Amino acid sequence: MKTASIGLFLCAILTYPVRAAACSLAGCAGNGVETRANFTVRVIHADKPLAGVAVQVTAFGDQQATQSFSSITGKDGTARITGLRPGTYWLNAELLGITAGSQCFHVSNRSSWRSKSKISYEWGDLAPATRQIAGKLVDSQPGHDESPIMNLIHRIDVPINGARMKLQDPLTGNVYNSVSDDNGDFAFDSAPKGIYVLHIDGGTVSRDRDYDPSDILIRLSDTATRDSLLLKRREAGGGSCGGTYLELQNRSN
């Protein structure tokens, strides 16, 4: 059985550097690019400005990062960052839990000719495509052999039922809802073609397991080669940040 595995694992990476700092905020080589103390962040989608994107700037401290600045892009898709002191920072821009861009940067005591006055990102450019937003939600659990290592390798997929699933159009704000059934199956039959954020929350499995809510970017398109989603939720550990993994399949698989 062949699947097109899209390595979109989201260790709730979608809201970093807050929830997934340990997984995503891994250092800053060379202190990143240089910006001015005041600069503009611009976010576009499909070559158009994207409003409502949350922009966070976080300063690196001695022990842990503390938020230094936050803003929301306006109708022109821009947010203005002002008054940063010299230092090293992390910038994250996200909409509906999906990251548009994230990078480290620094502000110098005296800005050089290299310092940037604008940083641009494109949101939604990596959305995998499917002909139907339907499929199965499972919990990927360790196996039950005596060897802990083999248990991590040979995992068991258990259906998650009762998970609340919300499909939202980031441009129109339209929302479609579904709930996974006893077999973990779900479907959104009435959504028109376009790009969406799929939000997954809750659900019940055979073991007492807890996950943060997850958000996944997906494109509904007639030209997609796949038509079924396999969503696997798993715990952090063994080199994984945990969260939700997405695989695109054909229904005959």
Image (tube, rainbow, N blue to C red):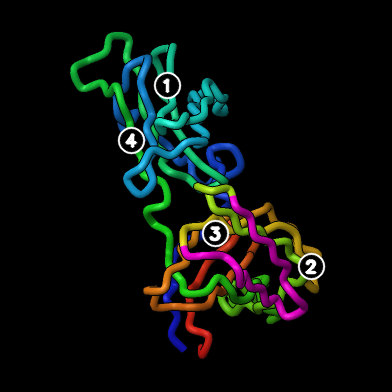
Residue annotated with mark 1: 80
Q: Residue 243's spot in the image, x, y percent?
A: 60, 58
Asked if 56 appears above or below 203 in the picture, the reply is: above
Q: Name the residue: 29% across, 21% down.
A: 117
Task: Kindly identify the residue that appears in the image at 46 percent across and 71 percent down.
Answer: 130
Instruction: Tell me which segment is drawn in magenta.
Output: 174-193
User: Mark 4 — residue?
Assistant: 120
Of 105 and 192, the residue lying toward us: 192
Of the numbered discs 2 and 4, the one sitting upstream in the chain is: 4
Q: What residue type is labelled 4?
A: Ser
Residue beneath label 3, please? Answer: 240
> Of the residues shown, which amino acid type is indicated by label 1?
Arg
| Above or below for 97 versus 197 | above
Image marks 2 and 1: residues in contact by CB distance under 8 Å: no
Which of the two discs, 2 and 3, labels the residue nearer the N terminus? 2
Earlier residue among tags 2 and 1:
1
Number of disc labels: 4
Along the horizontal axis of the image, is 151 left or right of 220?
A: right
Disc 2 marks which residue? 204
Q: Can residue 62 be seen in this view?
A: no
